[in-house]
Image (tube, rainbow, N blue to C red):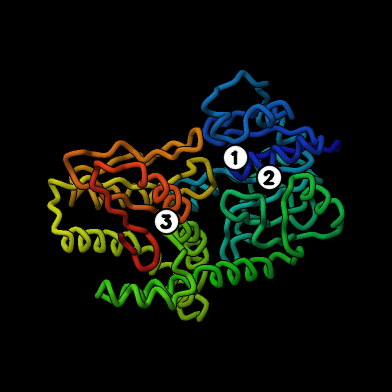
Amino acid sequence: MAESAVVYGLSTEGYQIASSLVTNKVPTIIIDENLQQAIEFTQGTAKSYKSARELVEEEPLLGIKSMEESIANANAIFFAPKIRKFDDSAKSEISSRLISISKNISKGSMLFYHLPLGVGGNSENFEVIERASGLKPDEDFTYVFAPLSPRTSSAVSAGSNSLKEPKKVIAMMKNAGIKSPHILPIVLSELHFSKETIMKYSPASSELEVARAVADVEERKELAKTLKNNDVYLDDLADGLFDLRVISNSLETGEPLLYLVSGAHRAIEGYVRYLTDELKDLMKRKTLKASKTSISISWILDKFEIRGEKLRIYDLLIERLSDYVGDVISPPSYEKGSGVIQLPILSDEKTNLVVACSKEDFVSLEKASKNYRNQSVLMLRANLVCESN
């Protein structure tokens, strides 16, 4: 089979993989998972459109191919679709998308799976693929589990069901720009992924719970000096929600690992309520009336990344704040042009309360706020201690 590739998923991560493949002269097709449309991806496309967002917004005329034939003819298939369902419905959405490509994969091909999975998740994938394709994962095709960090082509873990031709797998991953640790047997790679995810989010979630236990604002400022993760914002925390959930759902009741992952997940999931309560407390301390306050949420969101948790959290945050203060500015945006960063349009009649949901947002807004002299502006940082000016 001639070397060629299909990237299933017009996601930020999938687009990065496709761009790397064509740069390394691997004929590549990218599939829009929503339209079920296969598009010929070239070096010219990658140079003209730097991201999946740009490609979709520009709507260029590109070569349309048969999705079924493209998958059947591919030497390597990279599975990186956007997931926009949550809880139990996410699993069925992923399974449905996996079935749609499994029907057409050919014997001898390589399938790279880039979504987070819990313990035993790949065994379930093998069953889905075998039912849809008739191919046996231990004999007829190579399967590689390589869950990607958000908005990157770096794999948190890597595992394979077969390493009969490791050089072939490694070479294709290199062409795709996928950076990964040592490739392990599948079960070990699942455990490694769980361990890495828990280790990444447990420290911040532990300090978050400690911060929430301190009601006094001044005391919490003192506590902030001792926290190692106070520069972790809502943006960082939300990155881990999907991963923690799938790991938690894969574990049996009573397993110590379940307590670790569930604790981190519950702490992060409860952050929006904590942030909302702190915002209300800030307004109370500043004697601000809801009718005289305008809230702006500053959060640069990538609508094309694989995980959709941030979009869900953002909608939840807007919903909760709108119940309390009617004037909530959405979507959050500010422009970076000519070296000047501009805040959203501020009200001259109301007190403007700006919530910075990431460190990048906070730094940019802090610089921009110096240009505004006539408006009353308060800033709340959506970090572990919810600091305000």
Residue 196 position (above or below residue 239): below
* Residue type of the residue flagged with mark 3: Asp
Residue 292 position (above or below residue 28): below
> What is the number of the mark on residue 9?
1
Residue 221 position (above or below residue 344): below
Do tag 1 and tag 2 residues touch (Cβ < 8 Å)?
A: yes
- Crowd rating for badge 2 (residues with CA inside 10 Å; few <14, some 14–19, many 20+): many
Give percent across and percent down for residue 211: 35, 74
Residue 14 position (above or below residue 118): above
Q: Would residue 355 be found to the left or right of residue 55 on screen?
A: left
> What is the number of the mark on residue 78?
2
Q: Earlier in the sequence, mark 1 or mark 2?
A: 1
Q: Would residue 364 be found to the left or right of residue 58 on screen?
A: left
Quarter holding the C terminus? bottom left
Q: Who is closer to the viewer here, 274 or 355? A: 355
Question: Is any part of residue 89 visible from this angle?
Answer: no
Q: Residue at x 72, y 41 (%)?
A: 105
Tell me the CA gap for discs 1 and 2: 8 Å
* Residue type of the residue flagged with mark 1: Gly
The residue singled out by tag 3 in the image is: 87
Give percent across and percent down for residue 385: 35, 68
Q: Residue at x 55, y 22 (%)?
A: 59
Give percent across and percent down for residue 262: 44, 71
Q: Who is closer to the viewer here, 54 or 56? A: 54
